[in-house]
Image: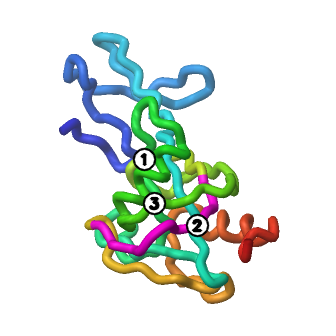
């Protein structure tokens, strides 16, 4: 695997193994190769999450590993190539909680800039669980929380999304 520095930038060119240098292109600082002209733009990756409600509570998962080990998150994950965000959240929910979900609407789109793996764009939906929870390997536990009793350590921008969802009056739909 290609070594990266603390910001997630490549240290060496993935094509010719030449050491990359910092270069400013279009007012953006990027890593560039002086040998083969490779440029590492470090564009955000799309992810998707979902707020699932039951009995006036929100389902959250406690992560089993880094990044954000022990923190609470909404079900979700990376969107695969040529997959829509809605299909991705249905697939990710099935993988993480072993159940289908019914997507009811979009909460918003959030720039995740606190993940050590890089910048992500999180497309967050709300919906309902359509089955029983059978936790996958990525998470160590799950719990339904009242909105006014959310855990202290919530990763990404999930607390902000929950607050936005509540402000829109959707918490008990």
Is residue 126 part of the magenta span, yes or no?
Answer: yes
User: In x, y percent, where is residue 123?
Assistant: 59, 49
Q: Earlier in the sequence, mark 2 or mark 1?
A: 1
What residue is shown with label 1? 78
Residue 119 seen in the figure: no
Q: Which mark is residue 100?
A: 3
Magenta range: 124-136
Give the residue drawn at x 60%, y 74%.
53
Relative to 122, 142 lies left or right: left
What's the distance in space between the residues labelled 2 and 1, CA to CA? 20 Å
Q: Which label lies toward us, 1 or 3? A: 3
Q: Earlier in the sequence, mark 2 or mark 3?
A: 3
User: In x, y percent, where is residue 144?
Assistant: 52, 83
> Considering the numbered disc 1 on the image, is that residue within a helix, a strand or a loop?
strand
User: In x, y percent, where is residue 84?
Assistant: 52, 38
Q: Earlier in the sequence, mark 1 or mark 3?
A: 1
What residue is shown with label 2? 128
Corner quadrant of residue 50: bottom right
């Amino acid at each position: 695997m290609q070594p990266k520095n603390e910001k997630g930038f490549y240290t060496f060119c993935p094509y010719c193994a030449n050491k990359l240098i910092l270069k400013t292109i279009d007012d953006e600082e990027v890593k560039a190769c002086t040998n083969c002209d490779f440029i590492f733009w470090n564009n955000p990756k799309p992810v998707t999450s979902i707020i699932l409600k039951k009995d006036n509570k929100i389902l959250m998962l406690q992560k089993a590993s880094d990044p954000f080990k022990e923190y609470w998150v909404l079900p979700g994950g990376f969107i695969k190539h040529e997959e829509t965000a809605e299909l991705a959240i249905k697939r990710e929910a099935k993988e993480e909680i072993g159940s289908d979900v019914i997507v009811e609407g979009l909460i918003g789109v959030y720039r995740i800039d606190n993940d050590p793996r890089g910048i992500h764009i999180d497309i967050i939906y709300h919906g309902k669980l359509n089955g029983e929870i059978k936790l996958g390997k990525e998470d160590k536990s799950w719990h339904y929380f009242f909105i006014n009793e959310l855990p202290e350590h919530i990763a990404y921008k999930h607390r902000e999304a929950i607050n936005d969802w509540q402000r829109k009056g959707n918490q008990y739909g």
